[in-house]
Each structure stands twice: as structure tokens, then as C-alpha cells.
Image (cartoon, rainbow, N blue to C red):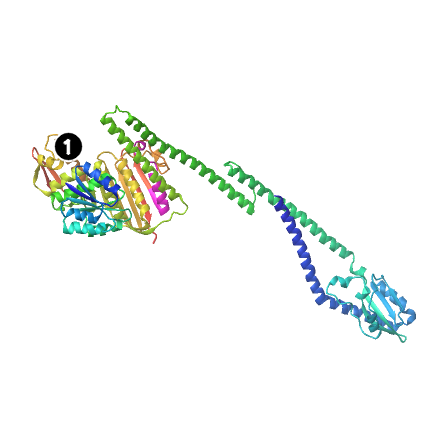
Amino acid sequence: MNTLYRQFIVATITILSVSIIVGLTLANIVYVVYTQQKVTSNNIKTAQSIVDNMEHLHDYETLKPYLQSVSKLGYQLFIVDSQGNQEHFGNPFDSYHIEPAIVQAVLNGELYEGKQSFWMMNHFSNALENTVGVPLALEHNSYALFMKPSSQLLFSDFHTILLGFILAVMVLSIIGVVWMTKHLIRPITLLTEATKALSNENFNYELNIKRNDEIGQLIEAFHDMRVQLKHNEEARKAFISNVSHDFQSPLLNIQGYAELLLDSNVTAQQRKMYVEIINEEAKRLANLTKQLLLLTSLDQDRYPLKLEKVRVDEQLKQLVRRYQWRLAEQNIELSYKLEQAELVTDKELLMNVWDNLLTNAIKYNRENGSIHVACSAHNDVVEVSFTDEGLGIAEQDLALIFERFYQVDHARKSDGSGLGLSIVDQIAKLLGAQVSVVSEVNKGSSFTVQFKNKE
Amino acid sequence: MKILVVDDDPNIQQLVSIHLSREGYQVICAESAEHALQFLENEQVDLAVVDVMMPGMNGYELTSILTQDLQIPVILLTAKGQLADKEQGFTAGSDDYIVKPFEPKELLFRVAVVLRRIDRMVEAFIQLGNMTIDRQNYEITIQNETLLFPMKEFELLSLLASRANKVVTRSELIERTWGDDLADYELTLNTHINRIRDRLKKHGANVEIQTIRGIGYRLEG
């Protein structure tokens, strides 16, 4: 916190200083290039009108009183005669240094335009060198008259006020920055605390800051992230407990029946039964692992879809053919009516959808039941449905069947993993398809997958 | 029945041969196409199960030699994702194919289908009314709809259809379908025939199975 605080103040002072320096430099350039010349020529004009007056209206007697009165108008004057006698009028100068050559030149009738300097403040210093000099001839004597507006006139009360104003602005802006920094840093400090709480898995840390600026947006985004993380964490815990339960029970079964087999008293018939159970459970585990792997890879942010043209009807025929032996085994009649349909989609994933839906229809069918597979295509809409005459799903379960690990009670008895339909759902989302289901207990279920061909 | 299994993977070779011999087939294994051909110089087999991917001569080349020169039906084992090669398999002349990994039961089913096909040497297609029976693929087509009947029902229906409009006796139906002529199957036959009737009706077939009391059945269409 301290560093940010300090950085702000240092930055403010630096900015102020730099702007003052740059401002002064610019003002100096403007002054030296433009204003200085004007001021000097104005001063020379004034000096010359004084000289004019004196040469025409005054003699040596009235010279001093006249200059005295001119000085009262806000000028500093200095006069030198050819003998080197000198006198000043008005405020005294701080420095009376001036090159004798300059004085001589003015006595000889030349103009002196003041000392040349590239720093404007030099021009305002109360020095004799900063005056303008004009020659003056009075009663056959030549004089050099040096003159400048009084420094007191230049640095008047107004200038003091202006300086005070600038100082006040500086002080106030520093105070303002300090206050604003504090105001800015407080929510950041709070956010840091909240982040620490989050990393300690405390997902209930509330931030009570309402702001409409970018920090407000950051806090809102942080809030959303916290809610999402909380949800993910809960989902993850539920997932892990489901996975461990679903792995645990077949493993326990395998272990239990393997122990029974070790007993030398088992009859051949019992042995066969135990081995069959072990075999079934092993298959269930294998299936579960496979499905879990697929589901996890689907969860990745960007699943690499391999898009290609797929003949859906051909794919469904292949699928049916692959399960023909299971249909025969369970005496299930399968009928299909497939219109020619083509989709641009991921072939493997799509096959996975069909596979899950067909195996479900077989698994949850009844002896001598039937399955109907239909594929229709019109107006760029491809619709595939699997209708079985099986056990059906109760209405209260319908909303839940796409949840991971959700299994309707009777489904638990078979080798289902509880992942099949959530894989179907996930893939459908990925491929932009709609899955819908109609079902009635003891009558059967019908799953429909609908694709809109975007072409 | 003698079956030749050609696969360079000893595990698959063993798995396949165990399941086949348990079904009562006599199994001979070969780990390469060359080895298989060498063996066939002195021996006769009824069917070959051939893996597509093998070092040396591949499965397709072997299949075309087996089916064209030696008249041996072939079931190809293809890897997943090679489904596009299906046509290549069939052009090479194979009778059927299975995609790996497969359930042993699927293999047995396919083997049984192919063997029965060559065993009977019956017409592949029977057309009656709006119904077509494809005996090669065990499919029935009624008005654009394809039906896969349970096996026994398919056997019964195709037997009746092969002698359409003639009476087939109960004992012949039982013997040809269950391989037994015992009275145990009398009731089973009745339920099967009734189921077939229901199915035909459900799918809108314009053929009908008539009961000839005390003798048998007649398919009319």
C-alpha cells in the first residue's frame, strides 16, 4: 500500500515541477523572442520623451526636480555627465555596476538597449545594467540618462497574489492527490484481502463497495468470479464424491466376490455366478472410465472439433449394425426409417451421441421390446429420434437425467454410469444441437436430437 | 467348421480363437498373410478372420486372394476410424467387417451370419407384397422402413416367405429354426408367429400369415 501511495505523491510533485519548468521555459522563450524587444523599445520611447522635454523645457537648474518627479511616476533613473558625476532618482538600484564603455557610448550619442540575456528574470533584476540609456544634451553639456520602470512597480501586490495563488494550487493539488490516492487504494486493499480469502477457499467473503468507476467494475467482476468459483467448487466436490462412490461400489463387489471364490467350498455353479458378477463389474468400471475421460475432454474450454461432411443416415446404419448382436441377444425388434441427411459436424462426437442413445434404448428396454430410429431432413433441419418401448422415465426425473451421475433408480441396477446422457447433452451443446425427451413410465421414452444446418 | 484367424497381434489372435473355439469352431491361427497362404496350400477352411493392418502383405491383398482365388469367405477386422476403408474391404471381396475394439459376442454374431449365408446358399432377396427380405443382412424392408427382427422370428418369416402362398408345416418350421423337432417348441412357435403378425401389422405390411389348423402356416401376399 505504501509504495502505491508514495508513487502517487512523487508522481504528482514531479508532474508539478516538470510543468513549472516547462512553463517557465516556454514563457521565457516567448518573453525573450517577443515581449522583451517591445518592453525595451517602449522604455526607450519613454526615455526619449523625457529627454525631449528636458532639452526643450528645462535647464540645468530644473533638471533634478524634474527627474525627481519623473521617478515618482514609477521609474528609476540614473544620470552621468561627461565628467563622471553621477546621481540616481527614485528607488536605489541593487547594483550600480555598468561598463564604462557603455556610459561612454551613450555620452557619444548612442542608445543603450539594456543587457542582453536569455533568461528573462535577469531582465527584471534591480540592476543598472538592466536600464535603457539615452543621450541628453543640456546647455552644451552631454549627459547619459539611464532609466527603467521601478522594480516595485513590476512586482506589485498583484504579483504577490498571483504567486500565492500558484502556491495554493500546488499545495491543494498535493493534498487532493493524497486524499484521492487513499480513496483509490482502499478498495484495492480490500480486494487484496478478498483475494487472499478466496485462495484460502473462503468463497463467502463479501465485498461491500459500490462504485460506478472502473474499480467498481473490477469489484463486480470479482464478485461474479467468486460466485462462479463457489459453484465450481461445489460441483467439483459433488463430482468427486460421485466418482469415488461409483468407482468404489464395483471395486467392492469385485473384491467381495473374488474373496468368495478363494473359498474352496464353492460349487461350480456358484463359481460361474461369481465370475460373471466380477466380469460385469469390471466392464462397468471400464465403461465408467471411458465415459469420464470423454466428458473431461469435452469440458476443456476449446474442444478441437474436427468438422467434416457426415452422412447421418449412413452413420446410424453403421451403428445399428454394430449393435445387431445385442438386439438379437435381447430379442429386441429395431426398425429404422432414415432419410438421406448430411451435416457438417464432428463425426466421432456425433457417433458418440447416437451410441449413447441407442445403448440406453437397448439397456432400458424390456424383453421382446422394440426400438424405432428415425432420421428426417427438411429445410436444413436434421432430426434424429430414438424411441423405445422400455421402462420410461418419471416426470420428476426428466429434468435431472442430463445431470452428471444422475441415475433413475432402476437404471442403477444395470451397468449404466450415469454419464451417458450428460455426454449427449454436452456434445449436443458443442455441436449446436437441441436434445429433447418425451417419456412415460412403463410406456417408453423418445429422445430427439435436432440440428439446424447453417449454410 | 474350421476358421482361420490372421492377425499379427498375439493377444487378439488368442482372444478371438478362444471365443471361437468355445462356440465349437475349430480354429487355426496365423500371424501373417504369408504364413496364412502357406498354411492354406495343404488345408481347407470354411472362413477366415483377417486383420487389415499387418506387416508384409496387408489384409486387403490377402482378402482378395482368399475370396477370388480360393473361394473362402472373409471377415475383416478394421481399426476405429478406418470406417472409410469399408468400401475398400468390400471391393477386396470380404463378406463382413468388424470395427476394433469389438465385443467377442459381436464377432460370434458376425461369424454365425456369414457361415449361415454360405451354408444355405439361398436367394439373398425375397420380395412379397410391399415387403423385401434381405437374407444376407438380416433386414426386412417395408415401405422405406427397415426392420431388424429378433433372429428366430426372422428365420421363421424368411422360411415362410421363401415358400410364399404355400403351407409350411409346424414341424419343419421348428426344426429349421430351433434345430429340434421336440414338442417343447409348440407353444414357442405360436407366440413367435403371433409376434410376427403384430409386427407386420404395426409396420403396415400387406402380407399375412394364415394358420392352417393342425398343419402349419402359409404366408400370403
For disc 1, the marked residue is B188
Position of the C terminus of chain B by quadrant: top left
Position of the N terminus of chain B by quadrant: top left
What secondary structure do most residues of the magenta stretch adopt?
helix
Asked whether, in this view, residue B185 is left or right of residue A58, the answer is left
Quadrant in the picture for residue A264: top left
Of residues B171 and A51, the one nearer the viewer is: B171
> x, y (%) of residue A95?
83, 62
Q: Residue furthest right?
A: A61
Of residues A409 and B176, the one nearer the viewer is: B176
The secondary structure type at the circle numbered 1 is helix
Q: Is residue A421 magenta?
A: yes
Stretch of the chain drawn in magenta: A411-435
- Taking the spot 15% from the left edge, 47% from the top edge, the residue there is B40
Mark 1: few/some/many CA within 10 Å (<14, 14-19, 20+): few
Q: Across the whole image, how many numbered discs are drawn on residues?
A: 1
Q: Is residue A333 visible?
A: no
> x, y (%) of residue B46?
14, 44
> x, y (%) of residue B147?
20, 42
- Dot 1 falls on which chain? B
Does A88 sit above or below residue A160? below
Q: Residue furthest bottom?
A: A140
Q: Amino acid at mark 1?
A: Thr
Q: Is residue A385 magenta?
A: no
Does B213 sit above or below residue B94? above
Q: Residue furthest top?
A: A265
Of residues A197 and A77, the one nearer the viewer is: A197
> x, y (%) of residue A82?
88, 72
Q: Is residue B175 visible?
A: yes
- Taking the spot 36% from the left edge, 49% from the top edge, the residue there is A305
